[in-house]
Image (spheres, rainbow, N blue to C red):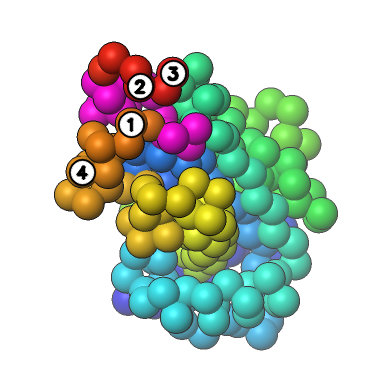
Amino acid sequence: MSLRWPARARQAGVDEAGRGPLAGPVVAAAVILPRAPRIRGLDDSKRLSAAAREDLARKIRARAVAFGLGWADAAEIDALNILEATLLAMRRAVLALAVPADGLLVDGNRPPAAEGLGLTGPVEAVVGGDGSEAAIAAASILAKTWRDAYMIAADRRHPGYGFAVHKGYGTPDHLAVLAALGPSPLHRRSFEPVRSACARPGAPR
């Protein structure tokens, strides 16, 4: 399926990565693509190999009119809930754009509030937008590759949890280590089974 290119010159695509993991931040990206030359190979980041994502991320950063990244960490996710933390990360990504966006295309059915973002155009929610809108696909790639890099670095700061492999998702190996070691500072205390692990005697709070 051919992706739609933004209808306006400064219409930014917005997407997130990391809503579902048990550990680490939720990360959002906002991308304003150039009209030309078009970046070939853009797609939903979940449909791309890790190598393809990294190659495309380099091209997006080099060719985009502007891009911004924003995130909410585990403590903010626990305080706000994952939906509100995701919307906060999206707002931070839009505010990080070096060139103001004149409108947003946001993946999903719940966009962030437009107030305070300096937009002159509409904010549109697009269900499945990471597979249909080029700017959202680009944002999905930047968010995913940045978050993956963060979790690989986190593996060195918090050895033993395997963050470089599972990126915080609830794989069997991750669950086994969580049960054995208890939660790390990166774990989301409001998510099960982390909440139960925190309740065990002697577990880190």
* Kind of element beneath mark 2: loop
Q: Is residue 14 visible?
A: no
- Provide the residue designation for mark 2: 203
Q: Are marks 3 and 2 in contact (CB under 8 Å)?
A: yes
The residues tagged by marks 2 and 1 sit, at their Cα atoms, a distance apart of: 6 Å
Q: In the image, residue 121 lies at what x, y percent?
A: 67, 43
Q: Are marks 4 and 3 in contact (CB under 8 Å)?
A: no
- Residues shaded magenta: 184-198
Q: Is residue 50 magenta?
A: no
Q: Is residue 150 visible?
A: yes
Which residue is at the front of the view, 169 or 178?
Answer: 178
- Asked if residue 18 lies left or right of residue 201, the reply is right
The residues tagged by marks 4 and 2 sit, at their Cα atoms, a distance apart of: 15 Å
- Provide the residue designation for mark 1: 182
- Residue 76 picture quarter: top right
- Asked if residue 175 lies left or right of residue 186, the reply is left
In the depicted structure, whether residue 175 falls above or below residue 49: above
> Which of disc 2 and disc 4 is earlier in sequence?
4
- Provide the residue designation for mark 3: 205
The residues tagged by marks 3 and 1 sit, at their Cα atoms, a distance apart of: 9 Å
